Amino acid sequence: MLQERRSALTAIFLISGIFLGFGLFANIPGLYKGFLVGDQAVYYIMAQSLAFDGDLEYTAKDLVRFNEDFWAGPNGIFLKKVVRDGRERLYYAKSYAYPLFAAPFVRLLGPGGPIVFNGLLLFLILLMGWNYFALANGPGLALGKMAAYLGASIAFLYALWITPDFFNMFLVFTVLFLWRYKAEVRKAEVPTPAAAAKPEGVGRPGPWKRFLLSGNSDYLAAAVAGLAVFSKPTNILLGAAFLLSTLLVGKKFWKAVALGLVLIATTGVFFVANRAWTTEWNYQGGQRKSFVFQFPLEHKDVTFDNLALTSHTMTTDGYAARLKSTAKLLPFNLFWYVFGRFTGAAWYFFPALFYFLLFLRGRKNLDAWLILAAAAGQILAYVIMMPDNYGGGGGSMANRYFMNIYPMFLFLPGVVMRRRETVWPWVMAAVFVAPILLSPFATTLAPSVHAKRFPYTLLPVEYSLINDLPTNADPDHFRQRWGMPFFNDRFVYFLNDNFNARTREENGWWTNNDKTADLVLRTFFPVSEVVVHLLNNPRRDNEITVRVDGKTKRILLQPMQRGELRFPVGDGFRISESHQYRIKARAAKGSIPYHEDPTSLEKRHLGVYFELELVPRTR
């Protein structure tokens, strides 16, 4: 047993060491091609500002310093304008918790610093999880459980991101470990670490183990929970579950009160610091905007207020209307949250679903029910309060907001496990997440590339996230317009790459070869009929198949022959004033005119050309 424990510990150190080595020596800007996506830019520039200036104020110096490491961006940066000491200042409008802890590593190691910091968090998660599951299982099996938890999901990918997601997961994991470790040790059927090790000649547990088994570890858990709440406010539900456990399971009213005060005080300290740094309590409050392509202060005449075309104002206007539509969207969003093509937890975080099923069939206790309630409450909070962006935005991989919920599912089943429990997560990972994890930086830069192939193409598309799907990271796929001049009340969103980008002379799109172009048509007026105007490529007897809103029609066309298919439609998938219709188009035969006609300069692989005509509903 002692040798097995040493081998498991050695493996943990080796895994973490390799990750740390990567952070220390990899060319992070080169791997990202100088461009940080998915909120990474704002957190990196915040860490730089804290590391070198000791503040959260955005200045021209910050922008220059960022571009010394990453030569594009900082796209997606969030800023807010406040008046301080009689003049306008700009401050970063994101939680500074993660940048604060990553700042020393950024100062010492530059772009690789956050990766090294995440590597240390990875080491601690592995160590805590291994110690927890080794209470009732062999050391090798306990390590296998943790390897499946991290490696059979995309959680590991976010250790390579300069965002708070892995940090938030670490905080939640730490709270759960400090909470549940002593409870599992004290169960009569589970031996203490000391008792389990006695046959191997190991003495009493050391001071760290004694601390974990003492009531003092609860105060550390409360403090970490307070930090987690500041970093991600929905974590208040986890804190509430922890306090309720102390009250209902531990039967300790005054201790629950004391732990609550520690949690509130810790959260309060960070909000007070935010107030001191930015003059506002809420890091997301005030005049808040996000910027892409152009940024305030990059030139003297470029300001927070005059970048209307390259900025987006964060406002609560229309928020009540969005909440009103939540009732209709809620069942859809809950389904997509678990089974969606781009965000489904069942595919990207399969261990969570697997652990939930184990919980349902196993022995249950009040702590597990409290943890489940906290997880369910957070999921509901996201889909209700952010029904059109519960996954984290268009640059995200899967659902990055699920990262701080993910550890709760690990702690749902009992600590006792069977060997086959480590196998099924890897089977699912081989099918769904292997392409992502084996090319993490490529998929980060193109976060939808995996979802354009089988088996993902069999999964349902999250229509409520139409403006934040990862396919939108490619400008040729996002909100495509047509018309002479362009229409402003209808857009096309392509879900795969089976089309040719529209040229300036074209008012529609050619599909690619004999492949199926998959797209969503979004209109801001009711439509009675969608008319699809077609143009064949040079192939003879080419069968064209078009599917609109679940109805399929076919037409046989000759070389360069035009055709037309008409589809009566209803409301489609409706969100507020918009209507969405799924459209697929395919030619049975493709053609490359350049290789077939000496006079042609057309080198694209053409399928069928289609233009969309929409007939408005008159009543």
Image (cartoon, rainbow, N blue to C red):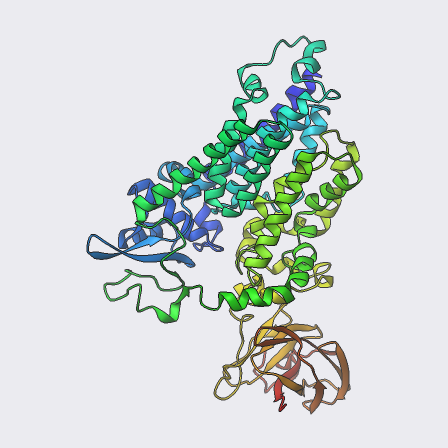
Percent of width and height locating residue 562: 68, 91
Tell me if residue 28 comes above or below residue 261 in the rendering.
below
- Residue at the outermost front position: 253
Residue 211, picture quadrant: top right
| Total numbered circles | 0
Tell me if residue 230 comes above or below residue 35 in the rendering.
above
Question: Residue 341 or 590: which is nearer the viewer?
Answer: 341
Residue 265, picture quadrant: top left
Percent of width and height locating residue 585: 69, 78
Q: Is residue 120 visible?
A: no
Question: Residue 243 or 463: which is nearer the viewer?
Answer: 243
Question: Residue 146 or 36: which is nearer the viewer?
Answer: 146
Tell me if residue 201 comes above or below residue 49 in the rendering.
above
Tell me if residue 253 comes above or below residue 118 in the rendering.
above
Percent of width and height locating residue 569: 70, 83
Quarter of the figure with the C terminus: bottom right
* Residue 227 placement, left or right of 554: left
* Residue at the spot 49% in from the left edge and 50% down from the top edge: 31
Percent of width and height locating residue 388: 56, 63
Q: Is residue 524 visible?
A: yes
* Residue at the spot 35% in from the left edge and 51% down from the top edge: 66
